[in-house]
Image: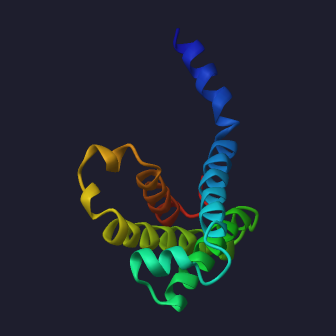
Amino acid sequence: MSHLITKFNNFFLNFEAIGSLLFRLGIGIAFIIYGYGKFPLPPEGLIEYFDLSPFLASLVAISEISTGIILIIANFIKNPIGHTLTRLAGLNIVILMICIFAVAHRDWFITKQLFTSVQIFLLIGGFYFLIKGNKI
């Protein structure tokens, strides 16, 4: 039985990089889609609903798209620059998501809505890439 467990686990070691890439693609694409949905600039919805300045509302949209793109591209840069870009994208995700929770979802803190929303998983993904960088 021990031999079977070892073979099973060794089989999946070959796919660790794919798991990380799929997670990175999911988070990156989500940020690209969220950012793209705020175009054309400045995003009127953010300005009206959250009373943001046109500059800040545009910065949010551009930041979301660029973070998603950088997160995906950094996976293919196999040096300290790629590692740093991944961590910076993770940091930006964490900052964006904390601001989103503080501004748009204050009523969600430690509730069912928080733990059943996609936003909490984006925040967790941001922390993952901030801490882990490009290391698998």
Q: At 48% across and 72% down in the image, what residue appears?
A: 91
Residue 109 in percent (x, y) is at 25, 57
Residue 80 in percent (x, y) is at 65, 74
Residue 119 in percent (x, y) is at 44, 55
Q: Is residue 127 left or right of residue 63?
A: left
Q: Nearer the viewer, residue 102 or 26?
A: 102
Q: Is residue 104 left or right of residue 87?
A: left
Colour basis: rainbow
The quarter of the displayed image where residue 66 is located:
bottom right
Q: At 54% across and 91% down in the image, what residue appears?
A: 55
**Relative to 21, residue 70 above or below:** below
Q: At 66% across and 64% down in the image, what residue appears?
A: 32
Residue 19 in percent (x, y) is at 64, 42
Q: Nearer the viewer, residue 56 or 42?
A: 42
The quarter of the displayed image where residue 37 is located:
bottom right
**Relative to 7, residue 125 above or below:** below
Q: How many marks?
A: 0
- Report the residue that reaches farthest toward the top: 1
Q: Nearer the viewer, residue 102 or 133?
A: 102
